[in-house]
Amino acid sequence: MLPVPELAKSDPFWFQQDPHRAAHGRLTLLGPTMPLYEVYNPAIAQFNADHAFSIAEYDVMKEGMTPEGAIAKAFKRAEAILPKLSNRAGLRRRKR
């Protein structure tokens, strides 16, 4: 993790001593940044915050659920979240 950009830009530790740190610093501090996908879609943000796939893994490992059943449970959670929040964000469902 880099420090505050203004401090890192003036510190030779980040840009002169190690080519790997310098590359990371250039990409992180000097290059363009891109927001995470969750910024554009609150439904995905909520789904990821619920840790549905992590819970599915836990269900398989600790609860003895079949992988198919655990994934079905995760997708059922997604189906409950996505329509509710996607419509609020002004996103349209794709026609199949």
Image (spheres, grey):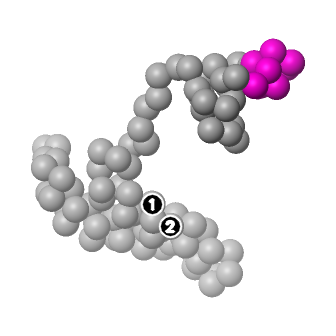
Residue at image position (86%, 18%) is 17
Secondary structure at badge 2 equals loop
Check disc 1 and give the amino acid type.
Answer: Asn
Does the CB distance between marks 2 and 1 fall below 8 Å?
A: yes
Drawn side of residue 41 relative to residue 48, left or right? left
Where does the image place residue 3, in percent across and percent down from the top left?
Answer: 68, 39
Number of labels in the image equals: 2
| Residue 86 falls within the magenta-colored stretch | no
Q: Is residue 78 above or below residue 37?
A: below
Drawn side of residue 94 relative to residue 28, left or right? left
Where does the image place residue 78, in percent across and percent down from the top left?
Answer: 34, 64
Secondary structure at badge 1 equals helix
Say the numbered circle drawn on residue 51: 2
Drawn side of residue 41 relative to residue 11, left or right? left
| Residue 16 falls within the magenta-colored stretch | yes
Where does the image place residue 84, in percent across and percent down from the top left?
Answer: 19, 66
Badge 2 density bin: few <14, some 14–19, many ≥20, Cα 10 Å: few
Q: In which quarter of the image is residue 40?
A: top left
Q: Is residue 58 above or below residue 91?
A: below
Badge 1 density bin: few <14, some 14–19, many ≥20, Cα 10 Å: some
Q: Give the range drawn in magenta.
A: 11-21
* Viewer-closest of 18 and 42: 18
Q: Looking at the image, which residue sits at the far right?
A: 17
Check disc 2 and give the amino acid type.
Answer: His
Label 2 – label 1 distance at C-alpha = 5 Å
Residue at mark 1: 48
